[in-house]
């Protein structure tokens, strides 16, 4: 804890304020509050605004601490003083003020840092006069940069859509990146086929650094370790080339191009380093993870657009000759396969990155509804959050499903199912949207089973997408009717609505990818135009048909789904009855649940939610700590994230299976990766279950219930075994026999 016994006297309105221990009671109370807080806080006392601060603020000062104790704010923060002066003057005049998400560019430990803060500035009074300024800072860098990254990607996509020339594409992305991140120089360097020389055709600068256009340099001149990292496809981030061991021996090369801090992103094509995307600063700068990630995103995105642009250029030129055209078509197929693979990887990563933040949001919303069940407004807000999280999850699932179905990667789990149950399951899934829009739903189902051969999960998904589409495009309080019948050996499901309908030109393409009805400011329904495409592909896999009909705009729509029926009644189930003793077993204690996730928000919120439900939880943020705790505490269940910082969740699951202390622990994978291959890999690694973020709490509850039953049976068997091992007492007759005289 900082102590400011050396704080020099400050004068306020002719009154001398000595060391903090001698301050009046009010000022001392504020001083104690500042020292006890974990948030960065300081007092700027007197006309000189001399600094009194806590440990959290000393971390922001870096090597300026402890010399900054009692020093004037302007001398400690000269780089911020001109910007902050008007706010200090306003507070010294007696008026409090705030700054939201303010960009602060300051020096710390000899490096320039760009960070964002929400700042609260309040006057502190003594003897009726303003004695100084009380300042509280809350860092918002992560949130602001996440928003910037999203907005940047949107703007980048819009900009690149209008460009078809590689030079203009690279020029535009370099300028956008430099302006967004406040970087002095940004550009691309091409690597020769031998991988030894980097050449700069053109770059972007904001005026503080000279252009490198037209220059070539040996790659190894900038450090052999750095060159090796780039050839391996690893991004290089250096805050100070003179201080970093990888670049210090070659500092002269960096001085020659005027660079003191660099980020270099390798671009790998056909298993070799083909280019680099670089950010340069003329002085030391601390690069954040978000800034580096944005540079990597730009490099990948731009390179794909450039490749596509060059391919289109090649195709246009090749049209002059037949042989050249055939060759270009072959190249196009290879390129399309490569792009398809890149798209699949991008979709999987996108789903993972989107699901990760949804997990703590979903858990926190559930926790709110449980903790404040008697507060209608909080419950309503929690319900809205939960619905939107589920909506986001459905969009992610649809996006991945369309990709997998299109490439023929979906394997149906065929069984004989009653299509009436399919309709019922679909209505359960769509109930939140239907209730939200106050629709009336009429359902007509036959009394007898309607047997079809299909994958029940995929059929429920198909019907749910049709009903969701009807609910979205029907005004509030509308009517939706579902009618199921059997006609000539085929089942027919009709879904009618009295919604907005479709123009004649839309009906033939309504099942095409990314097709949606026209949007207006009054009619924005959301979605990606994937739902009906997925219905068409899944129904085709079931050898069925789906069709759409509308009399026109304003006259509603009808969707018809047809499948062949299975002759005869086919009841039965593959499920085996469980052990009746296990079914009756009840665990007489709380489940011990260990949560392992490096995302602290996701881990902590899920832990709190499970505690409210009556479980005993603990949290670890890396695999090795989790392994030690598991061996010591022997949890009943472990909820394990796959992407851990030290070893991945697969390896952790394998180690848990090999330890006698955790032989009875049920490991559950909780991850943002939800494709079939991810599930298979999890089960092969030793996980008993695989859940996708945000966690379906109903599915998790079923897992915990079954785990409790297993734990109860295990404890009962252990108790029975212990009882059998105890010596059996002799009966009364045996005792009498033993005492009778021989």
Image (tube, rainbow, N blue to C red):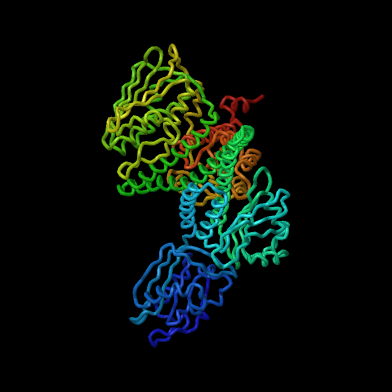
Residue 196 appears left or right of 168: right
Task: Please tell me which residue lies in front, 435 or 239.
Answer: 239
User: Image point 66% across, 49% down: which residue?
Assistant: 274
Q: Position of residue 588 (x, y in %)?
A: 48, 38
Q: On the image, which quarter does residue 634 sit in?
A: top right
Quarter containing the C terminus: top right
Q: Residue 708: in sight, yes or no?
A: no
Q: Residue 39: in sight, yes or no?
A: yes
Task: Please tell me which residue lies in front, 668 or 318.
Answer: 318
Say above or below: 507 vs 570.
below
Task: Please tell me which residue lies in front, 582 or 478.
Answer: 478
Q: Residue furthest left?
A: 477
Q: Position of residue 255 (x, y in %)?
A: 67, 67
Residue 131 appears left or right of 70: left
Task: Please tell me which residue lies in front, 227 or 567.
Answer: 227
Q: Residue furthest bottom?
A: 14
Q: On the image, which quarter does residue 535 sit in?
A: top left
All told, the count of numbered labels is 0
Say above or below: 343 vs 185.
above
Say above or below: 474 vs 375.
above
Q: Position of residue 70 (x, y in %)?
A: 50, 79
Residue 300 appears left or right of 137: right
Q: On the image, which quarter does residue 96 sit in?
A: bottom left
Q: Position of residue 215 (x, y in %)?
A: 66, 60
């Amino acid at each position: 804890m900082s102590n400011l016994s050396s704080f020099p006297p400050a004068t306020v309105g002719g009154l001398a304020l000595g060391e903090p221990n001698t301050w009046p009671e009010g000022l001392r109370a504020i001083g104690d509050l500042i020292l006890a807080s974990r948030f960065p806080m300081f007092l700027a006392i007197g006309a000189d605004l001399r600094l009194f601060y806590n440990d959290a603020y000393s971390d922001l000062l870096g090597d300026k601490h402890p010399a900054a104790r009692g020093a004037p704010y302007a001398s400690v923060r000269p780089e911020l003083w001109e910007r902050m002066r008007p706010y200090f003057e306003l507070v010294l005049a007696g008026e409090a003020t705030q700054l939201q998400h303010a960009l602060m560019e300051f020096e710390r430990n000899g490096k320039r840092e760009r960070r964002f803060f929400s700042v609260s500035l309040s006057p502190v009074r003594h003897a009726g006069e303003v004695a100084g300024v009380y300042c509280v800072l809350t860092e918002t860098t992560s949130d602001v940069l996440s928003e910037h990254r999203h907005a940047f990607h949107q703007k980048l996509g819009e900009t690149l859509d209008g460009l078809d020339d590689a030079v203009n594409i690279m020029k535009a992305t370099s300028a956008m990146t430099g302006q967004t991140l406040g970087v002095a120089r940004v550009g691309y360097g091409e690597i020769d086929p031998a991988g030894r020389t980097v050449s700069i055709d053109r770059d972007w600068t904001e005026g503080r650094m000279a252009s490198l256009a037209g220059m070539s340099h040996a790659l190894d001149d900038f450090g052999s370790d750095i060159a090796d990292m780039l050839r391996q496809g690893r991004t290089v981030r250096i805050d100070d080339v003179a201080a970093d061991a990888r670049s210090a021996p070659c500092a002269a090369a960096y001085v020659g191009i005027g660079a003191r801090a660099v980020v270099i992103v390798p671009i790998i094509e056909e298993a070799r380093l083909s280019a680099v995307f670089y950010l340069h600063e003329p002085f030391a700068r601390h690069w954040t993870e978000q800034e580096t990630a944005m540079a990597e995103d730009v490099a990948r995105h731009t390179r794909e657009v450039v490749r596509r642009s060059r391919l289109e250029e090649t195709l246009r030129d090749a049209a002059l000759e037949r042989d050249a055209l055939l060759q270009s078509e072959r190249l196009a197929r290879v390129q399309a396969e490569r792009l398809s693979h890149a798209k699949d990887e991008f979709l999987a990563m996108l789903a993972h990155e989107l699901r990760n933040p949804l997990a703590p949001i979903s858990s926190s919303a559930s926790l709110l509804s449980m903790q404040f069940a008697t507060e209608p407004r909080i419950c309503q807000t929690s319900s809205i959050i939960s619905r939107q999280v589920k909506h986001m999850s459905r969009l992610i699932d649809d996006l991945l499903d369309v990709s997998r179905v299109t490439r023929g990667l979906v394997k149906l789990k065929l069984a004989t199912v009653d299509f009436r149950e399919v309709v019922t399951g679909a209505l359960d899934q769509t109930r939140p949207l239907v209730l939200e829009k106050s629709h009336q739903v009429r359902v007509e189902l036959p009394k007898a089973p309607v047997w079809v051969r299909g994958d029940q999960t995929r059929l429920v998904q198909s019907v749910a997408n049709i009903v969701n589409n009807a609910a979205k495009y029907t005004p509030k309080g509308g009517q939706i009717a579902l009618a199921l019948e059997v006609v000539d050996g085929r089942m027919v499901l009709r879904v009618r609505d009295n919604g907005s309908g479709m123009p004649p030109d839309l009906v033939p393409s309504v099942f095409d990818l990314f097709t949606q009805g026209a949007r207006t400011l009054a009619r924005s329904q959301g979605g990606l135009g994937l739902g009906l495409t997925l219905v068409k592909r899944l129904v085709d896999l079931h050898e069925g048909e789906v069709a759409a009909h509308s009399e026109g705009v304003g006259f509603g729509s009808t969707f018809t789904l047809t499948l062949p029926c299975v002759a005869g009644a086919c009841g039965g189930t593959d499920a085996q009855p469980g052990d009746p003793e296990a079914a009756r077993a009840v665990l007489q204690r709380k489940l011990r649940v260990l949560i392992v996730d490096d995302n602290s928000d996701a881990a902590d919120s899920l832990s709190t939610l499970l505690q409210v439900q009556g479980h005993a939880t603990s949290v670890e943020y890396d695999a090795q700590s989790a392994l030690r705790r598991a061996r010591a505490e022997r949890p009943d269940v472990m909820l394990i994230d796959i992407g851990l910082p030290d070893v991945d969740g697969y390896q952790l699951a394998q180690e848990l299976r090999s330890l006698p202390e955790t032989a009875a622990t049920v490991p559950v994978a909780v991850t943002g990766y939800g494709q079939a291959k991810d599930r298979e890999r999890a089960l092969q690694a030793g996980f008993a279950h695989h859940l996708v973020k945000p966690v379906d709490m109903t599915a998790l509850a079923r897992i915990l219930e079954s785990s409790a039953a297993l734990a109860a049976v295990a404890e009962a068997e252990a108790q029975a075994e212990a009882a059998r091992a105890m010596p059996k007492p002799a009966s009364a007759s045996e005792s009498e026999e033993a005492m009778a005289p021989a």
